[in-house]
Amino acid sequence: MDVAAEQYGLKFSKPKIVMTKFGEREVCNAEPTEEFWSAWREKKDELKRAGFGVSKSFDDGKWQVSLWAQTMSREDRLAASDASRATDAAVNVPVPEGMELMPFQRAGIAYALKREGTLIGDEMGLGKTIQAIGFANSISARGILVVAPASLLLNWRNEIKRWQTLDLPIFVIRPGKVFTGKTEGWYIINYDIVSRYEAQLKATPWDLAVFDECQYMKTRSAQRTLTLLGGTRKDKTTKERVKVDPVPAARKLMLTGTPIMNRPAELFPILHHLDPKRWSTWSGFAKRYCGGVMTRNGFDASGASNLDELNARLRETVMVRRLKADVLTELPAKRRQIVTLDVDDESVAAIVRREVEVFERTEAAIAAASAEMQRAEAEGDEVKYKDAVAKLKAAQGIAFTEMALVRHETAVAKLPTVIEHLKQTTGKVLVFAWHKDVVDGICEAMRDEGVVSITGETQNEKRQPIVEQFQKDENIRFFVGNIKAAGVGLTLTASSHVVFAELDWTPSSVSQAEDRAHRIGQRESVLVQHIVLDGSLDAKMAKLIVQKQKIIDNALDAKVAISEPEVTDMPLVPLERPAPTEKQPVAFNERRAKLDAIAATLTPDQIEAIHEALRTLAAMDTDRARSLNGMGFSKLDTMFGCELAERTRLTPRQAAAGMKLARKYRRQYPTELYGRIFGQEELQEAS
């Protein structure tokens, strides 16, 4: 309080922040005293310069003294505004070993560290989730609540596993799951069920509460908004309006790429929760920024006003927001993400289980037939060999037919969650799928937002006009195409966001589809998202495809950042390729003669070295090729390779067959063994 206030016996109310024509000011009021009136008459100008003012109250018409003060100096406002746009900051953010934040992500965390509540409004694809986890690491939060749309729960779980530094347990709260209250850890819950767990969520304060896609709370009277942010609701018994407390948290983060979906009014519940002192009253906010006026039907806040001032105040108080264009030099040409969707519908879960069961059964049949074929070749048994070849073809044919059916089932079952994800996007988006009914379903759901499509049925002469419509018409947000029909030859650089609703097994086909956006004319980093159901074959395929693409990109020296996928199963057959053709194999007699010729040249030392190499590979292959880890045999070779390794001795013919495996996996065992098997001259060439 100003010294003069005490001198004049003024008893001021608690200060509040209001917007004036001079900007944001803090004000408190008091009843005037005789001492003050005397001073006011003598030195009014001096008191005005000190921030004092006199006016009549709107409520009762009585005189009141106001004491005004700036909330922030001009220098502080400029510094806060600059920080909200910053692309780097000198702040040490804990991250796991081998991980590194981008400079603009550090800047976002630095902005949040200075506030109790922050709105991270970065454009989609700039890593708001990672910034939130980095913030939690920085403040050593041990009880963290994350509220997100249902489709993002598992994505949060996966990112927390990758980026957290305190090794806290992670709990995903699902419908019907017992949740008695928090202990230490991350608690992830979706907006649709928060009201069921209101008591538990509010029982004790959280160190940090994170609200992802916070535009879900844009309506003040919505049940989820009242549960999480508080407000007032009508009591069912008394019919009186009662206060609802928010979820208690020491620090709060709101995340969204679209802070304002339709109009400024949607921001108020979020801002009031983050900083109730500066964003105090709905009526004041609505009058200033929503064009609010009284009408016959009540208060109308559907408009917009003073938007430049609103933007400035947001950046000075709670919001950090950068666009891709702001940090383009920091972003790689392509960023690939695997978005894993939770499976909480039993009918969908049953389809996923059936898909995995069919895949594992057909995969085992192919692996067994392949091992039988290798065994027969090593034994020189033509009858067994031909029988094994027939079994392999039959297994591949069954795999193609059955997998095509169950993968279609999975794609259709996944469609609603894919659509939900697409509705959260902004700007123009390319969407790729395999099946026509999936393409049609997406087009129908997105029709109101503007959509065009190209499939195998689209006539050639109509394709370019469709492309031009997507490129030039601002009312067309979505291009939906079949991976094969629309994945090549088209330029769709109006979008920098690619979503795969379904996958192609071949990485080159996926890369070609990505490159509809990533080509000459594209000025932004391209975000590529693979939408998969948890536990599905698509989830495994996506991780492997991204891993293969990384190898290809590195080989070509492409500067593409790819998040490391988890170790994943590798299917034996390309599930989206045509069924096997009747290609005539090399005559068995020729193969046998070639193997016999090699066997005849092998020395006892070579046979022993081959056996030792196979045993080394088998010892590394402890999971029998269940995961793609670069160790041991691949799935096609593991049965036969391990069988040879486990023998007490190898015949020359078996050693000749094992020699092919030794050459194939030569980088995984000592070079000394390689030299003993193939000779020092070949060893030098291989080196």
Image (cartoon, rainbow, N blue to C red):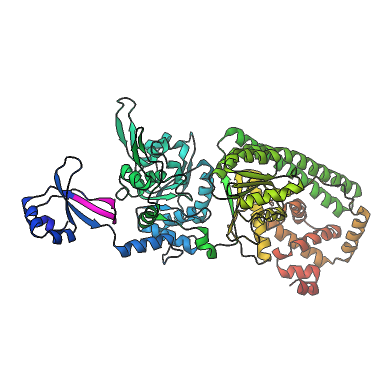
Q: How many numbered marks appear?
A: 0
* Quadrant of the image containing the C terminus: bottom right
| Horizontal side, residue 177 vs residue 311: left or right | right
234, 519: nearer the viewer: 519
Q: Is residue 409 left or right of residue 399?
A: left
| Res. 97 visible in picture | no
On the image, the x and y values in percent for residue 622 come to: 66, 53
Magenta region's main secondary structure? Answer: strand
Question: 416 above or below 129?
Answer: above
Depth check: give the residue in front, 360 or 85: 85
Q: Is residue 417 left or right of residue 313?
A: right
The verdict on residue 19 being magenta is: yes
Residue 322's x, y, as percent? Answer: 47, 58
Would you identify the image quadrant in which residue 413 lies?
A: top right
Answer whether residue 640 is magenta in the image: no
Q: Nearer the viewer, residue 475 or 602?
A: 475
Q: Check the image and name the residue furthest to the front.
A: 296
- Position of the N terminus, as image quadrant, is bottom left
Q: Is residue 487 visible?
A: yes
Decide which of 289, 185 is in the foreground and name it.
Answer: 289
Give how far across and how far down residue 148 sits, in percent: 47, 44
The region drawn magenta spans: 16-28
Residue at point 36% right, 64% down?
Answer: 79
Residue 355, horizontal then vertical, whole percent: 68, 39
Query: Residue 316's image quarter?
Result: bottom left
Relative to 351, is 652 above or below? below
Note whether 407 is above or below 46 in the view shown.
Answer: above
Q: Residue at point 88% right, 63% down?
A: 598
Q: Is 32 located above or below residue 593 in the figure?
A: above
